Amino acid sequence: MSQLDKQDVADYLRQNPDFFNQYPELLADIELSHNCGQATSLIERQTQVMRHKLQDYATKMSDILGTARRNDVQFEKTKRLVIELAAATSLNALTEALKQSFINEFHADAAHLALFSKVENTDKHPNLSDAQGDQQIIALADKNWAYCQAFKGPELLQLFQHSSTLKSCAIVPLYLGDTALGVLIIASNTEDHYNQQLDTLFLNHVAAVAGRCLGRLT
């Protein structure tokens, strides 16, 4: 009888997964080593493997549930902001709604709305400005979607009176159709508060609503 090759044994067991059900007494003789060097039976090792898998599944499920809870909170905050934006009857009220929401609810440290059309003298909110003709600020809205970056550049510094502590920001271009109406800049004193890995889905949703509101107010 020819000597069995290890690979042949492995292939046979893989093709016959019920082999140890037919010969359960063999399980008592099979040993696998722990990392610590102690021996354990196959059934104990299988139990350990299954336990680790269950722990991994529990961790993944916990992460999924945690993400779902965060999304629920995000949705409620965004819904409140959308209601305030829809109720705004002036640019001052619209700007205040954006400021209050992002600073008080979304933990930003500053917010500013720069419009690309003339702002009337009655619209004197400190977080609102007229960027008509300012090509540096208009260039911030070259992209038709929200994006995050480090807080830097003269175009940003001129919009915020107290900018020395600001480290990161979200740039939110506001469009009505294909027309750029302005840009909302939300800034933080923390470097990674607004980073390139941040999901900007809700920011784009806010931008769509704010753009509609600006369309009726300007």
Image (tube, grey):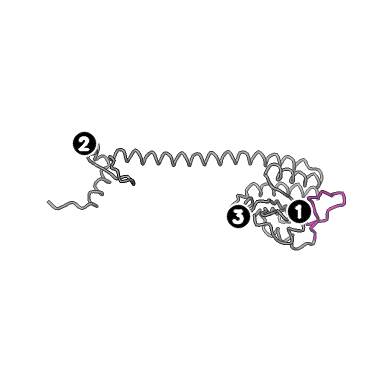
**Badge 1: residue crowd in 10 Å (few <14, some 14–19, many ≥20):** few
| Residue 217 colored in magenta in the image | no
Report how far apart the C-alphas of labels 3 and 1 lie in the structure: 24 Å
Q: Which residue is mark 3?
A: 196
Q: Which residue is mark 2?
A: 25
- Kind of residue at disc 2: Glu
On the rendered structure, is 100 left or right of 204? right
Q: Callout 1: helix, strand or loop?
A: loop
Residue visible at 81% across and 56% down in the picture: 130
Residue visible at 64% across and 53% down in the picture: 191
Q: Which residue is mark 1?
A: 162
Farthest residue toward the left? 1
- 72 relative to 200, above or below: above
Residue visible at 68% across and 45% down in the picture: 107
Q: Callout 3: helix, strand or loop?
A: loop
On the rendered structure, is 196 left or right of 94? left
Q: Callout 2: helix, strand or loop?
A: helix
Closer to us: mark 1 or mark 2? 1
Secondary structure, magenta segment, majority class: loop
